[in-house]
Amino acid sequence: MHFVGVLPQPLVRWLRSVMSGSGTPVRDTAGPGGSGPPAINELYQARRLGLVRLAVLMVDDLATAEDIVQDVFAALYRRHGAELRTVTDPDAYLTSGVMNAARSALRRRKTARAYVPPPPATAPAAEDQVLLGEGDRAVLDALGRLTARQRQVMVLRYWSDLSEQEIAETLHVSRGTVKSTASRALTILRDHLGDRR
Amino acid sequence: MSTLEARLRGALAARAMQVTATQLQPARPPTLQPARPVRHRWLLALAAGTLAVVTLGATITHFLPVRPERPDAPGVTVPSTPPAPSPSPSADPTSPEPSSSPTRASPSAYTRSPSATAPARPEPAGATPATSEPGVARSPRPTQAPPSTAVPAATSSG
């Protein structure tokens, strides 16, 4: 249709959505020039799986991890828009948001477990237990005994391969705190794993 | 790297690699979520509440019955009352007290208590009640002889 070329781009997208029958209102998903997807959608496609894995290592529950990542992306979009022009390092923002949300989830879970017995859905699936080796399961069980802050430092250090300074910036703590927390966590892990040997 | 750190890396990698893209829910990029005026919801609620309060206040103020103000009476219509005498102990004992005057006098009171209407004059010791009571002396008794006439004779003879 020739008249489509003279209409503004948002109006064209709205006409297409109406003609295709999608009733859900859709926000502006195009980039600044209208040529491609916005930056946050590209970031979402590129970083979603890695952030879900990071959240799984913290909360040990896939559904909760997916919710955490989705909430962090939604918060990023609400605060900085689709093009992310006002955020300097979106990746660090997402990592920090996932860590904070996971810590909050662990705190809520701990409070809930103080009053009600843990539901069976939070236990790892049987196939996951089978796929993991005996040594890995022992290490993960020992990780579960750490505090949320210690677990954050361990995951960021040994899974995300962040330096102490990067961990301190991500968790908004000092570098000395990261160092002492990591040392204490390793001591606890060594004690637990030494008992199991 | 110590053995513990190596084990830690291996365990974390094994657990993370268990999560694959096929296990995740369908992707929902943030820009494709339904538009919701999340930021302005509280603002709308605040505006609605303020409007309701203002409307309620205006309605109450408008339909409330106006209390009429009492006009000040002019000075000429206000009756001036003399100042009451102070009941101080240093007041004049001869001055009549307002509270001592009888407010209600019955005919029987006149016949029985002469002190209420009699002047402050000492009566003679031999005076009879017939002469001291003017009501009794003035009341005529047509069927009987007036006894008041005998009293002066007795006093004069004695």
Image (cartoon, helix red, strand yellow):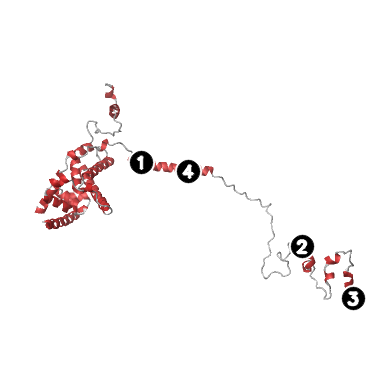
Q: Are marks 2 and 1 on the same chain?
A: yes
The amino acid marked with disc number 1 is Arg
The amino acid marked with disc number 3 is Ser
Cα distance between the residues tagged 1 and 3: 119 Å
Within 10 Å of disc 2 (Cα), the crowding (few <14, some 14-19, many 20+) is few
**Which mark's residue is nearer the viewer, 2 or 1?**
2
The chain carrying label 1 is: B
Q: Position of residue A54 (x, y in %)?
A: 18, 45
What residue did someone put label 2 on?
A: B106
Q: Position of residue A190 (x, y in %)?
A: 13, 56
What residue did someone put label 3 on?
A: B156
Residue found at the very far top of the displayed protein: A2
Compared to A6, does B22 lie above or below?
below
What residue did someone put label 4 on?
A: B56
The amino acid marked with disc number 2 is Ser
What residue did someone put label 1 on?
A: B41
Mark 2 or mark 1, which has the lower sequence index?
Answer: 1
Q: Which quadrant of the figure has residue A6?
A: top left
**Which mark's residue is nearer the viewer, 2 or 4?**
2
Compared to A171, does B35 lie above or below?
above
- Quick one: SS at disc 3? helix
In-image side of A89 versus B84 (left or right): left
In-image side of A75 versus B100 (left or right): left
Cα distance between the residues tagged 2 and 4: 65 Å
Within 10 Å of disc 4 (Cα), the crowding (few <14, some 14-19, many 20+) is few
The amino acid marked with disc number 4 is Leu
**Which mark's residue is nearer the viewer, 1 or 3?**
3
Q: Nearer the viewer, residue A162 or A62?
A: A62
- Quick one: SS at disc 1? helix
Mark 2 or mark 3, which has the lower sequence index?
Answer: 2
Q: Position of residue A18 (x, y in %)?
A: 30, 28
